[in-house]
Every structure is written in structure tokens, then in C-alpha cells.
Amino acid sequence: MTKHLVARANFLILAVLLVILALVGAMTWERLNASRDARQWSQHSYDVLGTLKDLSIALRDAETGQRGYVLTGKDEYLSPYDAARDRIGVLQGEMQKLTADNPVQQRRLRDLAPVIQHKLEELAQTVQARRDSGLETALRIINADTGRAYMRDAEASLTAMLADEEKLLTERVAQNDARAGWVRWMVIGGSGLAILVLLAAARLLNQAWSRSYESEASQRDLALRLRTTLDSLSQGVGVFGQDQKLKSWNHCFQVLLDLPKAMVRPGTAYAAFVEHTAEPGRPALETEDQIRHGSQRAGEAVTYERQRADSHHLEIRRTPMPDGGFVLTLSDMTKRVQAEGVLREAQKMQAIGQLTGGIAHDFNNLLQVIVGNLEFVRAKAGDDPKLQQRIERAAWAAQRGATLTGQLLAFARKQPLAPAAIDLAATMPDLVPLLRRTLGEHIDVRYVETAGLWPAMADPAQLESAVLNLALNARDAMPGGGRLTIELGNKVLDEAYARDNTEVTAGDYAMVAVSDTGHGMTREVVARVFEPFFTTKPDGKGTGLGLAMVFGFVKQSAGHVKIYSEPGQGTTVKIYLPRAMEAVAVVATRTSAPIDLPRGSATVLVVEDEAAVREIACAILSDLGYRVLEAADGEEGLRMFGLHASQVDLLLTDVVLPGKVRGRDLSESIAAIRPEVKVIFMSGYTENSIVHHGRLDDGVHLIGKPFKREQLARKIADVLGPPTTAGIEAPNIVELRPRRDA
């Protein structure tokens, strides 16, 4: 042991000496390089001084040539003048390069440049005056002393630059001498340091035994660091020996398997863990089939998944070791499973959206024809009550179809929204009387709000429809009566909540909660309650689209919806809408007083590819007094507008048109010709041309199909009248519920 320590000490001494020599050599080399650099900088200073002097001489040569030409009028004096003038530009550029490392000289060069330029301009002016007007004119310019002032300023600047450069040259020469001295003293110092190292060698030999102790301490520290690293892993790790007993583990191993602390200790048999985790609600480590499968594939890792009672998903991997033991690795895959669920939901939404978008346009066109013609028939049917009743039933059926289509679009997040900042404390209380009349006296409606409510960012009409749908579902869950509570509040969904609900963005939300004391739902029903067409009601009692519409509206509004329910304990649906940071929109109050339909005499260009829809729209407009032009597609619409461009006041066009010119393209083409022409889009299904991210583009007016005669009349009157806020005139798809003023 002693020989080994001595040999190690000798090796260390030799190594230290070599390092010192290397350092001394490296520093000496560096000093030599620094000295060479200093010489180069000195030469650089000489170059700057030479260039400055050449620049001064060139200025004087230019002035001398100019004076000779002015006095004699001979062109041969212009040759030195032109040569000097050309050299001045070259010398200025060379000075810019040479002094690129000197900001002071660069600043002086920038100050000198206009002075030289003015001097050269003065010289050129006198030469031109001598050539054009004679000697006396040139002498008057010279005698004005402007050129002399410029020359004096230029010489002063050049003198200052020369002085600074000479001073810098002196400093660099001094630095070069100092570096040479440094090299001498470094050689001496390095030699002295080597002697000191030799004297310390004996001391190193005496300390050799302590280094062995330090090495052992380092090993202990390394083991501690490895243990800390193992405990810091988010995965659970348990190491079992050849005897199937626990040898080592980390903290996550105990947490993920939900093991008692007394069980997790060295020597605990693996069978004890298997037996403990086989209890109900715990993630069983292995089944008999997996153990048999693992024995058939000896030497290969076995991976399987388990789910805890709290819905945490675990991935368990058993990896054999060469000595016969194995390593058990536990990974919490809850987030991955949640992400896969969100992906599946998104794929389902995309499929439903494609299906809904494909049928909504054509279906709403058919409904538009039915609704429009029924209104005409109603006006011509007279006072026959039976006939009026049948017309009302047909109109009810058409509106019911529009409601179903609207709910499908809402679930698929394809409806165009007009979100605005809503004061929930001002709008929700107005809904309570309507709910009491709608739900009946056997339902006790209560309203609770929190002081200082945040405004919510959402579509007011869609929010009201969502609350009404939730209230109607609550009524059906309480056939014998009960209590319905609407609660408003401010909620902050933090990062921890967002981690557990991957579709949620952490932030501030305004909450609207609808609670009932009904029969509640099982966990299986809650898991499917937002699916379209899923309902627990008897046949003919529900479409299964109410909650699906609520879900789609909230998600399209960048919000979050959560449902809590237990059998026999009632249900609570909480809607979280993003907090609005802008001014609260003023919501117009409803009125039940009958108002005559607005009429007009403007010229309206109607562009619609469905002949029946176009016919009924033109008939309604003509009946309201408007002059109507019609076209079947975008190309025909452009041609029709070209023939009557000065007469058209408003364009009423479908969004989806056949051919190359769509509704948005048509409106932009007309706006480029006559910007004052108003535009109203009509559609039963909006594509991305006017709706982006689920929201109607700014300044766009849209009326949804199927629309009524009254809706079309008011929409056109609003657009042609005083400027109003762009918005959506949605079809009357909630006609089944009582009006607030009923």
C-alpha cells in the first residue's frame, strides 16, 4: 500500500512539474505573440499617420491647382487639382478602414467629411466661375474667405487626429517594452514556482494516506447522489434479487403502487407485493397468465398496463437481470391516456363536423323554401282557423328541423358565433322569470351570484340557449318537482387543474352553474352525456342534442364544461367561459309590442344557386317593395351587377356558390367597384370564407337559413339604415320555448 502511495505521489509531482513548465511555456508564447501584435499595432499607427499626412497634402495640392487655374486660366493647372481631388476620396476611405477600431478617430472622420466636402465644392465653384465668368467672379468667391475657413477647420481636425495617433503610437511602444519585461519576469517566476513545487513534494507524500480516506468519502457521496437521482425520477423503480426479494427502490415505487410504508423495506418478498396489489381498487402487479407468459419468454422484458381506483393509468415493465433478479419499472401514463382521449374526441368532432356541414347547407335550403312559402300561404289563407292551424303546424315542423340542424352545428362547433363581453349579473336575472314560467310551479328556481363578477366572453344568444337547454333537462330529471339553482361566480382554473384536464387552458373564467335535485346519473351515463343523439329519455321524448349543443358551444367559445352527478343526488353542470378583458356589450331588451315590418324601395341583387330559395327570397323582397335583380351563381351575379352597377344598393348572396366565384369573392369584387354597396350573406352552413375560428369576421352581416320574412325585412332595413354593429341574425330555432314577455 505504501509503495503504491509513493509511486502515486511521484507521478503527481512529475505531472505538476510538467504542468508548470507547460504553463510557463504557454504564457511565454502568449507574451511573445502579444509583443508581435504590439509591433503590428505600432506599424498600424505609422500607416494612419502617413495617411493623415497624405490627406493634408492632397487638400493643399487641390487648393494649389485651383489657385493656379484661377490666376492663369490654363487647363494644365487642373491636372494636379483633379488628381488631388480624386486622392482625397481614396484617402478618406483608407482612413475609415485604418481607424475602424478607434471610435474617437471615426467620429472625427465623420465630422471632417462634410468640411472636406464643402472645401471641394468651394474649389469646384471657383474653377467653374473662372471658366464661365472670368477671373473677377472667381476672385470674389475666393475673397469671401469661405474656402479659407473650411481649409482651416480641416487642417485643425487633421492636426488633432495626428496628435492623437502620435500619442497612441507612444503608448503602444511603451506597452511593447512592458510586454518584453513581462516575458523576462515570467521565466524567472516560473522557475521559482517549479522549485516551490519540488519543496512541496515531501508534503504530498505525507498526505498520501489522507487521500485514500477522501476517496472512500467520495464513493459514499457518489452512492448518495445515485440514491437521490433514483428518488427524483417520476417513474417507480423496484429492484428484486435472485431470491425474489426487494433490494432497492425509490419513493415513486411506493407512491404509484399505493403501498404501506412498513411493507417497503429490504427483504420483502415480491409475492407480498403481488398479494397486496390484488386487492380491489389497486393495480395488480401481475396475473397468472402474465407470469406464465413471462416464464415462456425468459430474458425478455414484459410490459403491461393497470388502472388504479382513482383512474390513474400505470404502465408496468418487468426487466430480468443476468443474476436472476429483475427490475420493476412503473410509469404513470395518465396524461398520455388523457391526450389520446382528447385526440379521439377531436377526431370524432371532425367526422361529425364533416357530416353536419355536408347536410346542413342543402337541408336548410329545403327548410327555407318550406318556411318562406308557408308564410306566403299564411298571408293569403284568410281567416279560416283550421287552415291557419295546419299552416302553423307545418311551420312548427320546419322550425323544429332548423333547431335540430342548429344543434348539430353547435355540437360540431360549426356555428358562426358573435362573441361579446357579457355582464352575467345583468343578463342572468332576466332569465329567471322565463325559467319559472317554462319549468312550471313544481320547480323551485333559485338564483345565486357572487359580488364582483367578471364579464364573460361568449355569444349572448347561444349562452341563453345553453342555459335553457340545461334547465329543461333538469326539469325532466325532476318529474315530481324539485329545486333548480343557477349560480354565477369567478373561477381560476390553475395549472394543476389544467394538467388533470388536458383540454383546459389555465386562466380566469366566469362560471355559470346549473344544479338540480333530480334523480342524477351513473358514471357510465355521465361519460356519454355529451355525445350527440345519446339520451336516456323514452323514444319520442328527446333528440339527444341538447347537451351536445351546450358542449359544442362552450368548446367553440374556448371555455370548459364539467358535469357532476350521482344517482339520487342530483346533477350540476358548470360552464366556464373565458373572462372578458374588454368593455361589456349592451344587450338589447326584448319587446312584445307588434311593430310593422320595415319596407323599402332600394335595389337588391339576389345571388342564390338554389332556384326555389332564390324564388322565395325574391318574392319576399318584392312584396316588401324592393326592386329585385337575381342571379344563379357568382359569374352571373357579376354580369348582372355590371349591367346595373349604378342601381344596386345591396347584395344578398349565398356563401356557398357553384363555380369559381364564391359569395365572399363576389362581395369583394363588387366592393372594389362600388364600396358603398351593402352586403348580406345568407347560408345554412358557413364555410371559412366569412367565419374563422368559429367567429364571424368583423364587418360581415349574416342571416342564417331558414329565415322568416320578418327577419329578412329587419336585417335589410338595419344594413341599409344607420350603421349598426355587424352580427348574426340567426333563424328562429327556439320557438318552442315561451317568450320572456309571455
Image (spheres, rainbow, N blue to C red):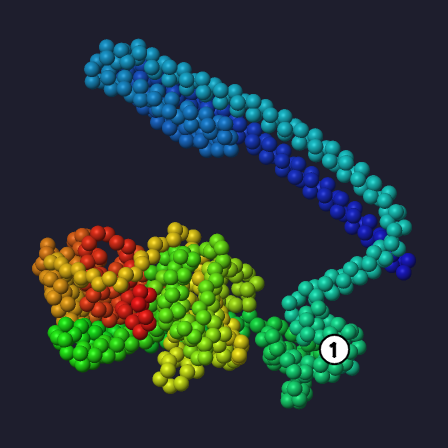
Q: Left or right: 635 with respect to 408?
A: left
- Give the residue at x 42% y 66%: 554
Residue 704 visible within the image: yes
Q: Nearer the viewer, residue 483 or 151?
A: 483
Residue at the far front: name it. 441
Q: Nearer the viewer, residue 138 or 86?
A: 138
Q: Position of residue 260 (x, y in %)?
A: 73, 74
Instruction: Report crowding for label 1: few under 14, some 14 to 19, many 20 or more residues within 10 A (C-alpha).
Output: many
- Give the residue at x 67% y 75%: 257
- Give the residue at x 35% y 27%: 86
Q: Position of residue 634 (x, y in %)?
A: 18, 65
Q: Position of residue 600 (x, y in %)?
A: 13, 58
Q: Secondary structure at mark 1?
A: strand
The part of the image, by quadrant, that contains residue 243 is bottom right
The part of the image, by quadrant, that contains residue 76 is top left
- Give the residue at x 43% y 63%: 558
Q: Quadrant of the C terminus?
A: bottom left
Q: Position of residue 142 (x, y in %)?
A: 30, 12
Residue 495 drawn above or below residue 277: above
Circle count: 1
Q: Left or right: 59 with respect to 340?
A: left
The residue tagged 1 is 240
Type of amino acid at the residue the image marks with label 1: Phe
Residue 688 visible within the image: no
The part of the image, by quadrant, that contains residue 421 is bottom left
Q: Quadrant of the N terminus?
A: bottom right
Q: Nearer the viewer, residue 487 or 511?
A: 487
